[in-house]
Image (spheres, grey):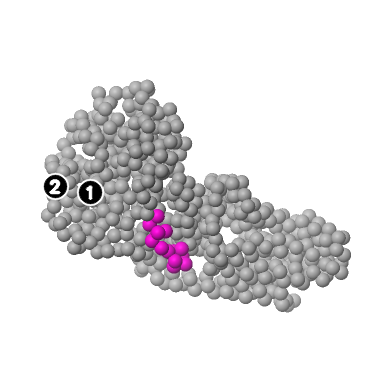
Amino acid sequence: MKFFAAFCLPFIIGCTVMFAVIVFKYTLWLWRLPKSDKRLIIKGIFTTRTLGAVWETVRESLLHRRIFRVNPVLGYMHMSLAFGWFLLIAVGWIETVAYLGARFVPLQGHVFFKYFMPLNGIPDSKPAFDFIMDLLLLFVLSGVALAWLKRLRSRVLGMKRTTKHILFDRIALSALWFVFPARLVAESITCGVYGGGSFLTGGLGALLEKSLGNDTLIALYEPAWWFYSCALGVFFVAMPFSRYMHIFTEIPLIFLRYYKLRPETHEKSYDNFEVEACSRCGICIDPCQLQSSLGINDVQSVYFLRDRRYNMLQQKVANNCLMCGRCEQICPVGINLNTLRQNSRTTMRNTAGEKRYDYLEGLDCSQGSGRTGYFSGCMTRLTPKTLDAMQRIFDAAGEDVWWADREGGVCCGRPLKLSGEVDAAQMMVDFNTELFRKHGITTLVTSCPICLREFRERYNLEGIEVLHHSEYILRLIRAGRLKLKHSEERVFTYHDPCELGRGCGIYDEPRAVIEVVGALVEPAHTREDAFCCGSSLANTAINDGQQLTIARDVIRELEATTADTTVTACPLCKKALVRGATKRIADLSEIIAENIA
């Protein structure tokens, strides 16, 4: 049998364009990968990592497990469209083989099987196939209905706001919304003319035949299949240039991650896979405090990735981000949003730092000679109570300390890096690395999570253990070197700093330290979901008043607990929160120094 009809042309053209563009993009991106990345792919492709990537693809690209965790109804919507469509294709393929055997059938023969084989000649199996295909079509249609509802009433699906789309997104989205209703109508009319079908297409077909008459159904027969083919064709043509490119891009991204490819602090071809894997689902919008506290709703990660993909990224979008990690933590695709934003800033504004930082040569303001070094960092030096508290803790523990920057020193470099000046930041890194090694320290303690993250991620400090002061204090306590007084009457709440929690994964140590001296109550948003204080060094766009607005929203939630004191473990967070507080704000080191027995 010849599996072709004129109405198949839009579908065939759409598929051809879609696969041509996708193959071109993938070939170009993979070809431009560094040789080291290509070696990682070759090394990992014939290992169990490939099996892990396959399983991850099933869990996330088809079943959308992470979106289910955000909201079950939203997860069901995504799963029904992805997994349901996949099952329709798979079961439809099996049905074709069951009737025609293992022979070549062109793609349109599988997709429009009900047109070419309205009565497929397998009476024993046909009712079962009809029922399964109807059930799967209903499954997908329920997802389409939820997608329509999401556009009208997004709060029903747990989202306060949805994404604002560009032209190609709207074209692809509109076509997708019509694909499955068009399939339902085309197959139902076919069942009305020829019989067959199951509870959905057969039932609707019988209703249409009874209502409109057989002659009318015959007249609508070809146009219905034309409309279905056109909807598919338009969607496939628009897909590589729209948000729906994620359908194919998310899968290779999963495999590349399993092969240990990682984003770097400079743009490379791997970034393309991450940028185009964004489905623009909009889940990252609600967690953004720029939106919830300030009403800024056009700079979130979904819009940053969109603008970067289409080469229309502006500094006002690239720079207006707290880079707190709340969106990155909730992203269902796991895109490294902060790294991508950092890379864009570096590309847009990178200046060499040699002339501006000549003064670094020979600079050494350090004091002491201990093997334990303490690096206060810029922000800690601006919160002297934290410095004084750390001095008391060191003295109580009998620790001989080398002070890297008590009387002045060099920044860790992270603020410069966050602003895009990577070359200048590297000069700070090189200077401090040489300084630490020159004084022979084996442990480096810092009270600043910003410095901590930079030391751990960017510095080459092999042989030097890097600790946040919360980790160090807890170690002293457990070693019996620091005796503290405890009282359940002292009630604290704890604010997780972004760089310490989401950035470095340190959540338990500060809480364990607090519970040694008093009781701890948690705010509504805590740990991975904790709010940013609003004074992030990463944001160079909002002003001081806007930072204060965010801080007041955060402190309002913290002070809603029964705690008398809000404890944080970041000097920048302390400076931000204290401005909007009516109760005490203290650094972790302060409450420990006050309760030394």
Residue where numbered disc 1 is placed: 463
Badge 1 local density, few (<14 within 10 Å), some, or many (20+)? few
The amino acid sitting under disc 2 is: Cys
Q: Give the residue drawn at x 87%, y 67%.
A: 214
Badge 2 local density, few (<14 within 10 Å), some, or many (20+)? few
Q: Is residue 323 magenta?
A: no
- The image quarter in which residue 176 lies: bottom right
Q: Position of residue 356 (x, y in %)?
A: 20, 60
* SS state under label 2: loop
Q: Give the residue drawn at x 83%, y 63%.
A: 192
Going by the image, does 118 lie left or right of 444? right
Query: Which residues lie in the magenta part?
Result: 307-320
Work out whether residue 128 or residue 392 is closer to the camera in this orientation and state it: 392
- The image quarter in which residue 244 lies: bottom right
> Looking at the rendering, in which quadrant would you find the C terminus?
top left
Q: Is residue 319 magenta?
A: yes
CB within 8 Å, label 1 to label 2: no
Residue where numbered disc 2 is placed: 365
- Point out the residue furthest to the front here: 545
Q: Position of residue 251 (x, y in %)?
A: 51, 61
Q: Give the residue drawn at x 36%, y 24%.
A: 490
Going by the image, does 483 lie left or right of 230? left
Q: Looking at the image, can residue 272 be seen? A: no
The amino acid sitting under disc 1 is: Gly
